[in-house]
Amino acid sequence: MIRRTPRLAALCALLLALGGCAIEPRTVPDERDEAWEALRAELDRLEHWRAEGRLVVREGRDGTPANFTWIERADGSFELRLAGPWGQGAARLSGGSGRAVLVTADDLRYTARDAQRLLARVYGWDIPVAALRQWLIGLPGPEAEYTLDRFGRLETLQWGDWQIAYGRYRLADEGLDMPAVLTASHASGDNELRVAVQAWQLGEPAPSPSRSPVPLMGGGG
């Protein structure tokens, strides 16, 4: 089972520290809205991307930390790899075409039509996986409300019952401003997700998933 820890404040501080090396753009654009539209167009064109970093999932008063790698592919499929902060436990979640598969460290395999329900059933994490794919790269949904920072990037995002705040950005190798630190909080106050992205890879085909699970997180339950 996933090991949880109440030391959420320390874990959140660690995530903020990880984002400390984020690089700000050198100049503030003259027209913030125009800068945002240009950035949004570039993000909309992304087909392949990979993000690596750390996250903390809080359910109630308990927080669960993990290292993560998210791989997005042009065919709409994705793979989320999770690993405990000291290499403990593991899981690999993959999805696409209306099917999700979760493989745990002890090689247990779970399937469902919805990745969010699968994570909730096995790990107790109520995370909107489909939305997270856009939160990570800093794109709002069609009906989401948002505010921009002075550089023309997302600063806050209201997505249904979730409020997302972007703390830091970093310049990816391709020159795009990509989120480095974000916090997603549910309106109930019971669920929170904090993410620090340490590395972005954009515009190149992601590697095919291995047949055996990477050393990941948790066990079946």
Image: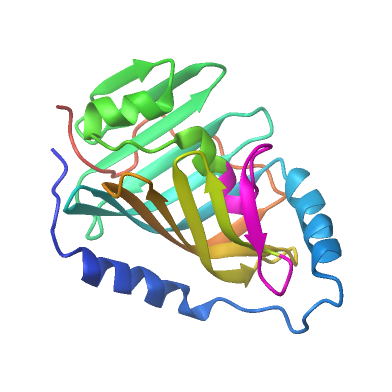
- Residue 177, horizontal then vertical, whole percent: 68, 65
Is 4 placed above or below 19 here? above
Q: Nearer the viewer, residue 79 or 15?
A: 15
Relative horizontal placement of residue 49, taking residue 91 as reference (left or right): right
Relative horizontal placement of residue 172, taking residue 4 as reference (left or right): right
Relative horizontal placement of residue 216, taking residue 47 as reference (left or right): left
Task: Say if the magenta span includes residue 167.
Answer: no
Is 188 placed above or below 169 here? above
Q: Quadrant of the N terminus?
A: top left
Q: How many marks?
A: 0
Relative horizontal placement of residue 120, taking residue 98 as reference (left or right): left
Q: Residue at x 32, y 36 (%)?
A: 126
Task: Say if the magenta span includes residue 142.
Answer: yes
Q: Is residue 107 among the parts visible in the rendering?
A: no
Q: Residue at x 22, y 60 (%)?
A: 86
- Residue 181, horizontal then vertical, whole percent: 48, 65
Is 26 placed above or below 166 here? below
Q: Residue at x 46, y 73 (%)?
A: 19
- Residue 28, horizontal then vertical, whole percent: 77, 81
Q: Is residue 146 among the parts visible in the rendering?
A: yes
Q: Nearer the viewer, residue 36 or 145?
A: 145
- Residue 111, horizontal then vertical, whole percent: 35, 17
Q: Quadrant of the C terminus?
A: top left
Give the quadrant of residue 211: top left
Q: Which residues are magenta?
A: 134-152
Is 19 placed above or below 76 here? below
